[in-house]
Amino acid sequence: VHIGGQDDGALTAFDVATGEVHWNWDGDGPAYGSPIVVELEGTRQVVTFTQEHMVGVALETGALLWSRPFVTPSTTTSQTPILYNGRLVEAGRANGITLFRVVNEGTAWTTEDVWHTDEVSLHMTNGVVADGVLYGLSHLNSGQYFGLDLDNGEVLWTSAPRQAENAAIVHAGNTIFSLENDGELVVVPHSRTEFSPIQRYEVATSATWTQPTLAGNRVFVKDVNSLTLWVVQ
């Protein structure tokens, strides 16, 4: 986890059983997203957005392997990195979306862009991937859903604008569940051609900022005031 605050934090590895600190890296303050653990170029590493960068550090030691400058307005990067076919998706407000690869040549680590688009972007919403398509809610056009081909960066479709200010998106198989910040759960099938919701449900009476949790036919929804269990019949 990346603990701390503005200009003062450390990406830290804790022992789950004891709380002992194995290592920490304090090269930058934290962002609002979460780190992931992946294997790139044969090396297990922790990849995360920080206050002003995106970085990869060695899982065993915490040593910095590579770093890319990345800043969003008001330093509000809220994304969790996404791994796709050994490459990483980089997204954030006013930065569009980029797919890049990490390259290791001896002891030198670098990154290379595969493609970039400014047609859509992400802010306070993580995307999900199904069959090579990234689904998300762009902050552009006052909240617009999109489907993007991760192999070439082509935006396959966009919804009408003004869908929602924010959404927490998860998926099960090829079904996308988007919990919008006003308490509406939108159920969307995987599609390379259009945004065509199956159903919309009102599942909360106050603002929803937390990811919905899917467990079998159950959906747990946390809003500002309560936790609710919904059952799919």
Image (cartoon, rainbow, N blue to C red):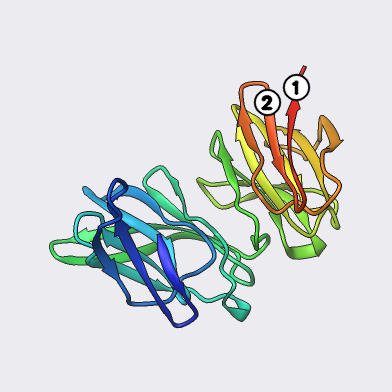
- Could you tell me residue 71's position as x and y percent? 52, 76
Residue beneath the point at 29% across and 70% down: 25
Q: Earlier in the sequence, mark 1 or mark 2?
A: 2
Question: At which x and y percent is residue 57?
Answer: 28, 62
Q: Quadrant of residue 92?
A: bottom right
Q: Tell me if residue 139 comes above or below residue 174 in the rendering.
A: below
Residue contact between numbered discs 1 and 2, judged by CB atoms under 8 Å: yes
In this picture, residue 150 sits left or right of residue 204: left
Q: Amino acid at mark 2?
A: Arg
Pointer 1 residue? 232
Q: Which quarter of the rendered picture does the C terminus lie within? A: top right
Instruction: Confirm whether residue 26 shows in the render.
Output: yes
Residue 66: image location, x then y, percent: 29, 67
Q: Nearer the viewer, residue 175 or 167?
A: 167
Q: Residue at x 81, y 55 (%)?
A: 164
Query: Whole-percent x and y of residue 225?
Result: 77, 51
User: Which residue bears the numbered disc 2?
Assistant: 218
Q: How far, Cα to Cα, is label 1 from label 2?
A: 6 Å
Q: Amino acid at mark 1?
A: Val
Quadrant of the rendering where the N terminus is positioned = bottom left
Callout 2: few (<14), some (14-19), or many (20+) C-alpha neighbours within 10 Å?
A: few
**Local secondary structure at mark 2:** strand
